Image (cartoon, rainbow, N blue to C red):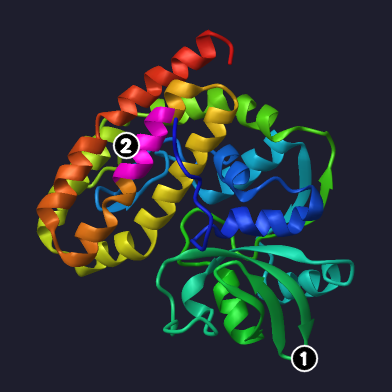
């Protein structure tokens, strides 16, 4: 595989947040993202909302799996009422930073244009609470951002995020085993195969779809001329999807999964190629790209099966 790894900004919130919490022992974000399992599939939630991550996957699953694969543990708290949660967070911050999230990004009003809930999840590193403000490192590009506690608590309640409990926080990050990046990537290959093999059988148009079915259905959805769908794709889903695929391709190539790496590199190029036609309104070009992407998920499944068969 001849490819140039991507370096730069992008919506890698939980991977970058984990890296901040792990400190100098953290692997590169590309490895963190890959071992979450996020690159290995595509889903169309409810038949309408696309993500370039596997059917049934969610960031909380990914964070848990990444910690396990890399030989780390962390204490997780969630579900308290607001006052108890803030009290616990304030107490934990006395001994160091705390990972918080998911939070509702729309309440993070230091980000331009954020005025209320938008249904977008995000992760932060909380640094301190003083008076009526909290200071956070926001991996979206806002170090030492200050936010009124009223806005933060609204965000942290996460009642617009469907995969997590409110007021989730992680602390006590501890490395319990020395696991190399290559060993961690190799160890998640069976899980990656399980993700890309997921194939729900929809009985209604509103059911969620996976992989090739999701890509083809999304191509049809583009004809609806939905502004919300286009905004989601061009501002988030395509950007993070192309990057995580490119990173996974690099990581798999390093551990000798050359066929799967080549397929994921092709997927990265296809997903990345969606950005221009979607941003400029060339729907036919975007549909062609999605239909070209669709069969690559079956190819990836076979590639991963082959890697596991020969014991990579």
Left or right of 284 in this view: 193: right
Q: Is residue 47 left or right of residue 91?
A: left
Residue ID at (15%, 43%): 288
> What residue is rendered at 69% in x and 54% in y?
19
Q: Main secondary structure of the magenta part?
A: helix
x 62%, y 25%: residue: 186
Q: Is residue 78 above or below residue 133?
A: above
Q: Residues within 10 Å of mark 2 (few under 14, many from 20)?
A: many
Q: Residue furthest right?
A: 95
Q: Nearer the viewer, residue 27 or 4?
A: 4
Task: Check residue 40 for magenta coloring.
Answer: no
Please tell me which of labels 2 and 1 falls first in the chain: 1
Q: Where in the figure is residue 252, as x and y percent of width and height?
A: 53, 30
Q: Is residue 44 visible?
A: no
When the figure is inspected, residue 184 is found, relative to residue 140, above or below; the finding is above
Residue 265 lies within the magenta run:
yes
Residue, disc 2: 210
Residue receiving disc 1: 131
Distance (Cα) linking label 2 and label 1? 47 Å
- Label 2 sits on a secondary structure element that is strand
Residue range (magenta): 262-270
The C terminus sits in image quarter:
top right
Give the structural element (helix, strand or loop) at label 1.
loop
């Amino acid at each position: 595989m001849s490819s140039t790894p991507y370096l730069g900004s992008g919506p890698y919130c939980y991977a970058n947040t984990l890296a901040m919490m792990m400190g100098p022992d953290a692997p590169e974000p590309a490895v963190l993202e890959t071992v979450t399992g996020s690159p290995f599939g595509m889903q169309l939630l409810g038949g309408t909302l696309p993500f370039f991550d596997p059917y049934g996957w969610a960031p909380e699953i990914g964070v848990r799996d990444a910690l396990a694969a890399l030989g780390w543990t962390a204490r997780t708290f969630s579900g308290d009422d607001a006052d108890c949660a803030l009290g616990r967070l304030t107490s934990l911050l006395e001994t160091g930073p705390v990972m918080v999230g998911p939070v509702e990004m729309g309440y993070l009003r230091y980000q331009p244009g954020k005025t209320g809930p938008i249904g977008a999840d995000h992760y932060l590193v909380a640094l301190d609470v003083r008076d009526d403000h909290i200071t956070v490192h926001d991996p979206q590009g806002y170090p030492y951002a200050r936010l009124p506690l009223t806005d933060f608590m609204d965000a942290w309640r996460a009642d617009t995020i469907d995969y997590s409990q409110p007021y989730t926080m992680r602390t006590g990050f501890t490395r319990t085993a020395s696991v190399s990046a290559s060993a961690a990537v190799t160890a998640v290959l069976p899980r990656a195969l399980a993700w890309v093999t997921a194939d729900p059988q929809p009985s209604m148009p509103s059911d969620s779809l996976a992989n090739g079915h999701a890509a083809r259905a999304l191509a049809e959805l583009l004809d609806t001329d939905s502004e919300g769908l286009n905004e989601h794709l061009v501002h988030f889903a395509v950007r993070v999807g192309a990057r995580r695929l490119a990173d996974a391709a690099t990581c798999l190539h390093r551990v000798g999964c050359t066929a799967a790496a080549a397929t994921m590199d092709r997927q990265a190029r296809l997903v990345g190629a969606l950005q221009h036609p979607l941003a400029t309104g060339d729907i036919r070009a975007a549909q062609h790209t999605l239909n070209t992407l669709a069969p690559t998920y079956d190819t990836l499944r076979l590639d991963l099966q082959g890697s596991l068969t020969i014991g990579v």
